[in-house]
Image: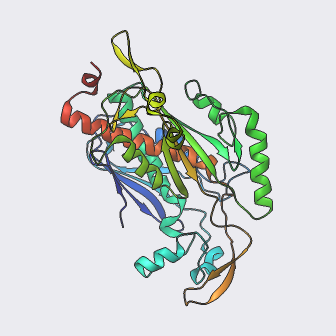
Amino acid sequence: MSSFLGRCFHIATWGESHGGGVGVVIDGCPPRIPLAEEQIQRELNRRRPGQSEIVTPRDEADECEILSGVFEGVTLGSPIAILVRNKDARPAAYEEMATKYRPSHADYTYDAKYGVRNWQGGGRASARETIGRVAAAAVARQVLNALAPGIEVLAWVSSIQDLEANVDPESINSEQIEDNIVRTGDPSKVEEMISLIKKARSEGNSLGGTIEAVVRGCPPGLGEPVFDKLEAELAKAMMSLPATKGFEIGSGFKGTLLTGKEHNDHFYMEDSRVRTQTNHSGGIQGGISNGEPILFRVAFKPTATIMTEQATVSNTGSDTELKGRGRHDPCVLPRAVPMIEAMTTLVLCDHLLRHRAQCGEVSAASQ
């Protein structure tokens, strides 16, 4: 099973939803980077369950423990191991799912591939696995702050079902996003989105939507063609998250409606910096960042486990029915925002270190 990400900033996540704990091992983090558990905990608090009335009520503090790789407040250059213990696991709620496959979940496909699975809460397929990613990204954030200050990564809920937010990627800030439990960035849509999620939950149903993200202050030069283009790495990172179903960058699919004359981003000089008049490319050209804001969107399907009867089959091959049990998000979007930011940060950190290894300081790419 592939549980690794990155080449220079290399992480391996581990653990199951209802096991003893989850976590991550980070290898390749540079030494002498300031790091404290509080910096990691701040990000884990943003993705933890039970944080509002519209997410899963599972009661987990998600307290992190740094087991290695940090001494007297700085990284050592050796592997960093981070542990979060599971304290509110209730595997009994999933006993029926030991023999019945949840529709559109990973139950059947895990059995088909491995011939064995942890049916307690989804095991490795649970979004609880993303704790390791978010913890690792908090470390990666400190690396970026030290080596390339000024890079800012923000994500927000841009739509839930057919309800769309209106957010300006150039001016949105973290305070606006974190000011509401939906994390939409559009105050006028908050109550409507909350009502929509609550209605779905009351009906035993679930909703999907999209998250938009922007990277501001990214220097030109990050990304490695041909197979590790920056947008390809971002796409892989986003599509590795649970419940993701689509990725588009810049103009995305709407760019197919334009002509080349309309779509091309014309260059111009601003002081000593190369800029583009438009940003249909989404900040990446030829697989390499060009210094403009990186803008992309990720689509999330409705949560697969719902609290209504559905047709399914058993692991013995008989038709049956299953009603979801346990504690689940009626809409994953609000808690997925920090996950999107985390995966973006991990990709940028890895490519920053790769660029430095091959080409030297990143500032040289922008001269």
The tally of labels here is 0
Residue at image point 28% right, 27% down: 362
In the current view of this chain or complex, which residue is farthest to the top? 271
Quarter occupied by the N terminus = bottom left
Picture coordinates of residue 114 (x, y %)?
Answer: 41, 78
Residue drawn at (26%, 42%), measured in percent from left and top? Answer: 77
User: Is residue 308 found left or right of 280 in the rendered image?
Assistant: right
- Residue 295 placement, left or right of 355: right
Query: Which quadrant: the C terminus?
Result: top left
Report the colour scheme.
rainbow
Residue 34 appears in the rendering = no
Q: Nearer the viewer, residue 63 or 202?
A: 202
Instruction: Give the vertical position of 273 relative to 108 (above or below).
Output: above
The one nearer the camera, 277 or 336, is 277
Q: Give residue 178's quadrant in the image.
A: top right
Q: Position of residue 101 (x, y in %)?
A: 58, 78
Residue 4 in which image quadrant: bottom left
From this view, report whether residue 170 is shown above or below residue 19: above
Residue 263, image x, y percentages: 47, 31
What residue sits 25% from the left and 35% below the top? 355
- Of the pair 100 and 275, the residue shown nearer to us: 275
Please state which of residues 128 and 311 is positioned toward the viewer in this rendering: 311
Q: Position of residue 124 (x, y in %)?
A: 47, 66
Q: Is residue 85 above or below residue 48?
A: below
Q: Is residue 352 visible?
A: yes
Residue at 74% x, 45% y: name it. Answer: 193
State whether residue 88 is above or below residue 352. below
